Amino acid sequence: MIPNQWYAISRIQDVKKKPIGLKRLNKLLVLYRDTTGKLVCMDDKCPHKGVMLSRGQQHGDVIACPYHGFQFDQKGDCVHMPVLGKNGDVPKGMCVKTYKVKEEFGLIWFWYGDQLPENEYPEVPMFKQFKEYQGYYSFYGWDAPINYTRYVESVCEIYHIPFVHKGSAINIWDPKGGKVDNFECKVDGTLITSDFVLRPDDERTAEETLVARKPWTRGWKFGIDVQMPNLVLIRSDVFDVIFIPTPIDDNTCWVCVCYQEPKRDLLLPLIKPLPIPFWRPVRPWYMCRIERFVQQDKDMAVISYQNPKVSSPKANRLIPLDKVNAHYIRFREKLIREANEQKALKEKISTKPTGEFEAPSLEQIIGIEEIN
Ligand code: FES
Ligand SMILES: [Fe+2]
């Protein structure tokens, strides 16, 4: 995982009135909304005896542990312990670690990294294409049994489609695989963009395949962009789709997919626009479900057996057409290295411990006199 980055951890619509527990970025988290609707995110672990707070109840602005009812406010401080009575003195340090979260673009973003002064957090990463998009779109999320780096890599290229997704629309002309032509790749900051034509492998030029009248002899223009740390946008003549695989732990990721309205009809009659208004928002919704319930299993049947499970510069032997993938791995290494250097530097400068609550020792609880 690359530190000091925003990661999408959930759809906004999934956190409603009740607290919810999630595992993301190797952390168990609880999310709830306080009485003003503001999102609160903290460790899903009661400091008292380690019970999951997400199984507790929310009372106004506080969340109460289901075991002994200790109540924690939005800052993670324990404000009430029923066992000590209404006016009981809550011992210092009975607190839960809270995290910076943000709601933007229909998603909840989690800051994975060092706390920063409020105005120093970078913007959440999102494609300009999405920011400017005016039509309907739909987000859908699910858990996938692979490391997120391998997921990013799998959507960094689409020349696996004729093999893994047999029978898919862009595969109709050549089940033996398409050829990639006119491949171009650029880097701007931590955004990698690419454009190419995926086409049948015959004597025609790429341009000729693009204007072919029969769909099964046609080539398609595609673009694949990667925005670090983990967003991939696939652009095409037919649809634009964003994939955001966020780590759950080292072996699993939460895949969030966002389909926009198809720009033109595929051969599938079901995604053809019907002349009824409510059909427009249904199409992205429907495409997300196809991705999840049709395509995803095909991908997982192949890529969940990749070895090694986590990608790295030495994990693959790439070809020039894998340039987007190569840039992604290089950026990932670079950003992790930079974050580690920054952390080492900060630790050198600051002599203060980094502030995690340390539980009092058993001796402190029992009292020295009694022990002796
Ligand atoms: S474990 Fe949470 S209050 Fe005791
Ligand atoms: Fe795939």
Image: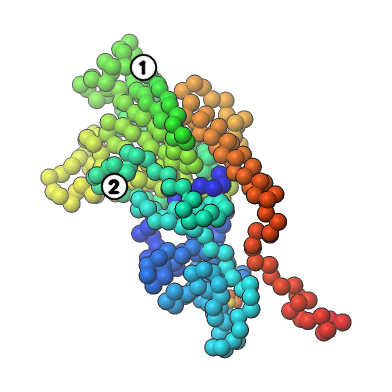
Task: Name the residue: 29% across, 37% down.
Answer: 239
Decide if ligand 2 comes within 8 Å of the CB at mark 1.
no
Q: Position of residue 283 (x, y in %)?
A: 25, 46
Task: Name the residue: 44% across, 67% down.
Answer: 32
Type of the residue with mark 2: Tyr
Residue lying farthest left?
275
For label 1, the residue is 201
Q: Position of residue 160 (x, y in %)?
A: 43, 30
Helix, strand or loop at mark 2: strand
Labels 2 & 1 near each other (Cβ < 8 A): no
- Give the left or right position of residue 317, taking residue 288 as reference: right
Q: Nearer the viewer, residue 124 or 261?
A: 124
- Give the left or right position of residue 271, taking residue 190 as reference: left
Task: Name the residue: 43% across, 26% down.
Answer: 186
Could you give the CA–CA distance between mark 2 and mark 1, rounded to whole angstroms? 34 Å
The label on residue 105 is none
Q: Position of residue 48 (x, y in %)?
A: 62, 74
Graded by Cα atoms within 10 Å as few (under 14), some (14 to 19) or many (20 or more), the crowding at tag 2 reads many
Nearer the camera: disc 2 or disc 1: 2
Type of the residue with mark 1: Asp
Q: Nearer the viewer, residue 355 or 231?
A: 355
Q: Position of residue 255 (x, y in %)?
A: 44, 47
The label on residue 137 is 2
Q: Is residue 286 above or below residue 220?
A: below
Graded by Cα atoms within 10 Å as few (under 14), some (14 to 19) or many (20 or more), the crowding at tag 1 reads some
- Give the left or right position of residue 177, taking residue 24 as reference: left
